[in-house]
Image: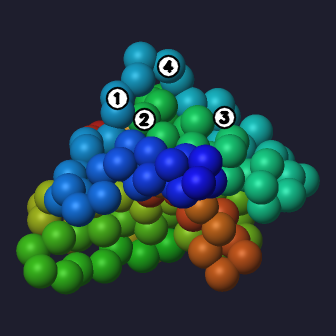
Amino acid sequence: MRKWVCILLLVVSLGCGTPATVSPVPRSTAGAPAYTEIADSFATMTDAQWDAYAAGLVGTRVDRWAGEVVDVTHMANTYRVNVDMDTDGIFDVSFNVDADTGLALDRGVTIMFSGTIVHARRLFGALSIGLDEAILE
């Protein structure tokens, strides 16, 4: 009987039956670590360690990172810049820009940018960092 009471309390505390709400990414005044520090952590951490570490990166601010434009993609009025941070030819960071900026960027150009991390995850075994509120400098 006690087991069922615990299960019932758990279900009630999870808000079973209530609609899910989407919360905005929390903004932090904390600066993100350097890209090399994040990449080193990605390379050496277990999946469980990485998941915990990456969750702590969300909402932190990237300040004046530099990388090479791999490509700019366009879909539904959105221009997405894909940036290689470690010269392996594979993009590591991506963010949206306006049409004028997206159309002006060329492959192979080194850009400097800032923004807020919205995700840091494994994507087919590679590091993928997404930014919001990105600014080219």
View extreme (right): residue:
44
* Structural distance between the alpha carbons of marks 4 and 3: 12 Å
Q: Check whether the beta carbons of the residues at disc 3 and disc 1 lie within 8 A of each other.
A: no
Name the residue that disc number 2 marks: 59
Q: Check whether the beta carbons of the residues at disc 2 and disc 4 lie within 8 A of each other.
A: yes
* Structural distance between the alpha carbons of marks 1 and 2: 5 Å
Q: Where in the figure is residue 102, as x and y percent of width and height?
A: 24, 65
Q: Residue at x 56, y 31 (%)?
A: 32
Q: Check whether the beta carbons of the residues at disc 1 and disc 2 lie within 8 A of each other.
A: yes
Position of 92 with respect to 96 (left or right) is right
Look at label 2 and name its amino acid.
Answer: Gly
Q: Where in the figure is residue 131, as x and y percent of width and height?
A: 39, 50
* Structural distance between the alpha carbons of marks 1 and 4: 9 Å
Is residue 68 at all visible to an observer of this figure? no
Q: Nearer the viewer, residue 87 or 75?
A: 75
Query: In terms of secondary structure, where does tag 1 sit?
Result: loop
Name the residue that disc number 4 marks: 30
Name the residue that disc number 3 marks: 34
Q: Nearer the viewer, residue 52 or 102?
A: 52
Which mark sits nearer the N-terminus, 3 or 2?
3
Which mark sits nearer the N-terminus, 3 or 1?
1
Name the residue that disc number 1 marks: 27
Q: Nearer the viewer, residue 96 or 71?
A: 96
Is residue 7 at all visible to an observer of this figure? yes
Query: In terms of secondary structure, where does tag 2 sit?
Result: loop
Look at label 3 and name its amino acid.
Answer: Ala
Mark 3 neighbour class, 10 Å CA radius: few under 14, some 14 to 19, many 20 or more: few
Look at label 4 and name its amino acid.
Answer: Ala
Q: Check whether the beta carbons of the residues at disc 3 and disc 2 lie within 8 A of each other.
A: no
